[in-house]
Image: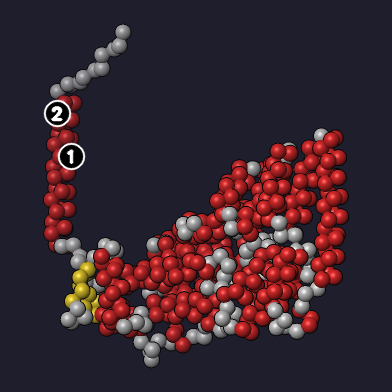
Amino acid sequence: MDGDDDTSGTMIDEIYANGGEESDQRSRRAIMSGDQLDVEAYAALYSGRTKIMRLLFIANKSKNPTVQLDTLRMAYDEIKKGENTQLFREVVQKINGRLGPNYEMDLSWCEGVDRKAEQKKERLENELNAYRTNLIKESIRMGYNDFGDFYYSHGQLGDAFKSYVRTRDYCTTSKHIVHMCLSTILVSIEMGQFSHVSSYVSKAEQGTDALDPIIISKLRCAAGLANLEAKKYKLAARKFLETGPELSSHYNDVIASQDVATYGGLCALATFDRAELKSKVIDNSNFRNFLELVPEVRELINDFYSSHYASCLEYLGNLKANLSLDIHLHDHVETLYDLIRHKALIQYTHPFVSVDLNMMANAFKTTVVGLEKELEALITDNQIQARIDSHNKILYARHADQRNATFQRVLETGREFDRDVRSMLLRSNLIKHDYNVRASRKL
């Protein structure tokens, strides 16, 4: 591997050491996220319906029977704290008697909840009809809002969405509008209707006088999730990076602070250039608070920026299994990982005139044949300006002719200087001979 200057020798040694197993102390660091997912600790980060849905998602995706039963048991217990009998029946069916008599169908509980629900619904309808008769806007708004809460708690998300939207016609302050938007955003996320999420985030942001830092952080998270779902990873990264530390656990019925760090960090790593990664992620004091909650993501970002690609990819490999169990991120893990790996390959080759593929394969923990295929794809996409010597296993960069480019810049500078001097002489001669052209007055 030949560098452009004398300093490349130390760079080569550093990168070679990063790829080697014996001399790289960083690769021996314990990576806790490589362990089996701690379901109880994970579930404790969330509340409400999202907690149940995340547990059920893990139960469906995990291939570990113990994890499946643990998540179903916790989902069963959590549902019985609420009023969603339909979801309860689905969970009991999934358990299928595998957790013993304590986790079987509880018909008396279901009947009791359904009976109370009917009574409550009848009461809410009577109250709303009375409010509409009296034409009290605030009471009507509260009536529809109560209906939205009722439907949401019983898992009737479509009806909940309609009820929350109806409150808009009766909102009298910007605070009411923001409350309506947050409610519809919550239901839309649960329904997977992320186009509605983006729309209502925009509506809420228009009521600037009613937005405190916590609400702003909630809206940033919702917008980040919508962009993530739309595969607009750079926009998603920006929204998560703009989330303030005030969020804390105030939005754990949708997202945890740890998720902000993970989603934002991976999206930034996949789409930001080095300058953006440094200024907007590593030097971002607000986002650093989130990264402290997920040390693995913090370390892999620092490793990537420091060109410690072997360690970075090791962290990513250990995180992959658990990230695949995330309800929002699972569809994007492969894409984000490919983008991050491609960026690492590009940055690795950029400073050098030639690269030994054997050494590079060692640094990226892959085979030379596999590495060649990856580099061929990047060269074909014009992301790497290089050619591969398959016989000697060397990658040669196609750098521009620096000598010729320098001469061209010098000649252009000379022409500009000559033009400027001639202009100055012409102006001075015009002034010397008192030759002035006055603009004619318009009549």
Question: Is there any visible trace of residue 10 in the rendered image?
Answer: no
Q: Nearer the viewer, residue 197 or 96?
A: 96
Residue visible at 52% across and 69% down? 330
Q: Residue at x 66, y 55 (%)?
A: 187
Q: Residue furthest top?
A: 443
Residue on which the image places disc 1 = 420
Three-letter code, disc 2: Asn
Q: Which of the labelled discs sits on residue 429, or is there none?
A: 2
Question: Could you classify mark 1 by the number of other residues whose Cα lies within 10 Å: few (under 14), some (14-19), or many (20 or more)?
Answer: few
The foreground one among 311 and 38 is: 38
Mark 2 or mark 1, earlier in chain: 1
Label 1 SS: helix
**Which quarter shows the N terminus?**
bottom left
- Foreground: 174 or 301? 174
- CB contact under 8 Å: marks 2 and 1: no
Residue under the image location 75 percent in, 59 percent down: 153
Element type at marker 2?
A: helix
For the residue pair 192 and 254, the one nearer the viewer reads as: 192
Above or below for 84 versus 94: above
What quarter of the picture does the C terminus occupy? top left
Q: Which mark lies nearer to you, 2 or 1?
A: 1
The relative height of residue 43 versus residue 86 in the rendered view (above or below) is: below
Q: Amino acid at mark 1?
A: Asp
Question: Residue 172's image quarter?
Answer: top right
Whether residue 127 is situated above or below residue 105 in the rendered picture: above
In the image, residue 396 sits, relative to residue 153, either above or below, namely below
Which mark identifies residue 119? Answer: none
Q: Residue at x 59, y 52 (%)?
A: 197
> x, y percentage for residue 3?
23, 74
Q: Is residue 36 left or right of residue 72?
A: left
Position in image of residue 299 (x %, y %): 49, 75
Quote the CA–CA distance across marks 2 and 1: 14 Å
